């Protein structure tokens, strides 16, 4: 894939190292999250428990790859991700609805302030007009 570029063998090795480090850090992060959830939210759970989750995660991925190849792994990812997609859509709608309510409330407050300032200006003008009538009428 990188044969057309200069230093293709170095670039291939670098690409493999980067992809490997990505998968390792992603797996480690996933293991940390699963470990934190299963330990009741503690961040300093036993190391053995985290190793168990990392090995379990790796075993599931290896089994899926060996059993059905990449298609089985992709199917499992889509199957587990679909319910979260629905939840995300509901959350997006709820966020939109909440932001819309907040914007409507802010608009209502702004209109009230503008109305109050107009009322204050009108009262001030009426007061000036009445005081000027009293001065001229005296």
Image: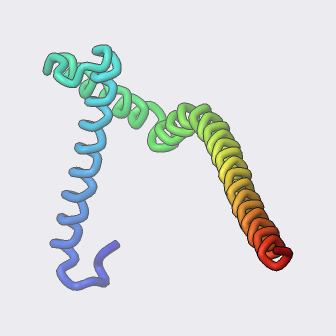
Give the residue at x 54% y 32%.
80
On the picture, is 33 further left or further right than 96? left
Give the residue at x 19% y 57%.
17
Q: How many marks?
A: 0
Q: Position of residue 56 (x, y in %)?
A: 30, 23
Q: From what the image shows, is residue 66 above or below residue 13?
A: above
Q: From what the image shows, is residue 104 above or below residue 67?
A: below
Image quarter in which the N terminus is found: bottom left
Give the residue at x 15% y 17%.
46
Q: Is residue 80 visible?
A: yes
Give the residue at x 47% y 38%.
73
Front residue of this view, candidates 88 and 24? 88
Front residue of this view, candidates 34 and 130? 130
Q: Is residue 89 visible?
A: no
Task: Answer with the quarter of the image where residue 12 lies.
Answer: bottom left
Front residue of this view, candidates 120 and 85? 120
Q: Position of residue 51 (x, y in %)?
A: 19, 23
On the picture, is 77 further left or further right than 112? left
Front residue of this view, candidates 24 and 13? 24
Q: Position of residue 32 (x, y in %)?
A: 26, 30
Q: Position of residue 106 (x, y in %)?
A: 66, 52
Q: From what the image shows, is residue 87 above or below residue 17?
A: above
Image quarter in which the C terminus is found: bottom right
On the picture, is 85 further left or further right than 25? right
């Amino acid at each position: 894939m990188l044969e057309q570029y200069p230093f293709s063998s170095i670039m291939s090795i670098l690409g493999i190292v980067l992809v490997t480090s990505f998968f390792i850090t992603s797996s480690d992060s996933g293991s940390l999250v699963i470990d934190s959830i299963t330990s009741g939210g503690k961040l300093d759970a036993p190391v053995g428990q985290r190793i168990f989750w990392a090995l379990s995660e790796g075993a599931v991925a290896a089994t899926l790859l060996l059993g059905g190849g990449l298609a089985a792994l992709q199917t499992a990812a889509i199957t587990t991700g679909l319910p979260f997609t629905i939840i995300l859509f509901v959350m997006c709608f709820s966020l939109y609805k909440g932001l819309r309510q907040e914007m409507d409330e802010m608009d209502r407050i702004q209109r009230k302030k503008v109305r109050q300032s107009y009322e204050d200006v009108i009262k001030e003008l009426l007061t000036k007009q009445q005081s000027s009538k009293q001065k001229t009428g005296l």
